[in-house]
Amino acid sequence: MAEKLAEIQNGKAPRPTNEAQETVGQIAEIYRARVQADVSLKPSSIYYRVQTLNAILRSWPTLTQLTPSKVTEDACLQWAKAYQKTVSAGRFNNTVGTLRDVFKVACELKLATENPALKISKVKITRKELILPSRQQFHAIVEAIRNTGAPCAHDAADLVEFLAYSGCRITEASFVRWSDVDTKTGMIRIHGHEETGTKSGESRSIPITPPMRDLLDRLSNRLRHAQNLDRVGKGFIMQLVGSPKALENACKKVGVKNSLTTA
């Protein structure tokens, strides 16, 4: 059956008739393969889309055994009503998009005449109020991280400071090198991940504010070897590439909500 689907996908076999028995589960695997082979997608985007596909298959276990033409709009709406209660609005909308894409593949392969998932309405995303810690609370968070006694405590605190002063995502901050710092212009060049770049795909410059300048001065005066051997000798400013647990624990200790993003 899998070979037959591959032949259909590659145009090497006749399109199936209305009596075809290919299932949504098999179509889902074609979609998964296409996503994983899409060179235009960043690894994080591929991972996320596969996550949403897996979420569909887990939350609608009987779907995989159905033929695409047997899945009704009502069935899709019933799934959506139940699934929406379990995830955020953004995750729900993106998962609906994946379900639509799966049935789009089915329609493309002539295994369905209509896309039943198009009937599902996406939900409105409301912005949550962002409550930032005060300057005093932020410094207390950083000191709480530094004083944990962990081998990477200072590196984790440095990372939290860099994220706060720069507004960078953690994947961007992790790849900033000393060579990206231009003290003459007072700017830092942000290139993002070595292979995938920034989220927008474009480099940008950020100003070296007084707190950032102080952090950079402190880091340059006490350069340490990275514990991660893959980062040794590459000129990275940050020695650590993640500290979500340390940040979460420090916020709880200080009594504030974690509002810094490490995504």
Image: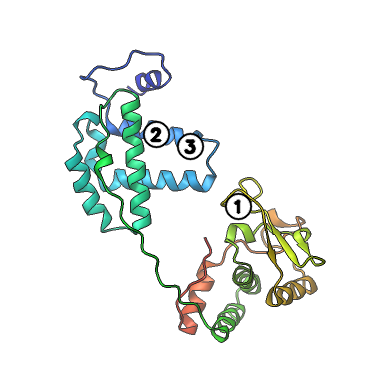
Q: Assess disc 3: are there few (<14), some (14-19) or many (≥20) residues with their C-alpha within 10 Å of its C-alpha.
A: some
Can residue 151 be seen from the camera position used here? no
Marks 2,1: beta carbons within 8 A: no
Q: Nearer the viewer, residue 172 or 59?
A: 172
Picture layout, residue 24 above or below residue 84? above
Q: Which residue is mark 1?
A: 198
Q: Which residue is mark 3?
A: 36
- The quadrant of the picture occupied by the N terminus is top left
Marks 2,3: beta carbons within 8 A: no
> Is tag 2's residue or tag 3's residue first in the polypeptide sequence?
2
Q: Nearer the viewer, residue 207 or 169?
A: 207
Kindly identify the amino acid type of the residue bearing the numbered disc 2.
Tyr
Picture quadrant where residue 123 is located = bottom left
Q: Residue at x 37, y 54 (%)?
A: 91
Secondary structure at badge 3 equals helix
Q: Residue at x 24, y 23 (%)?
A: 21
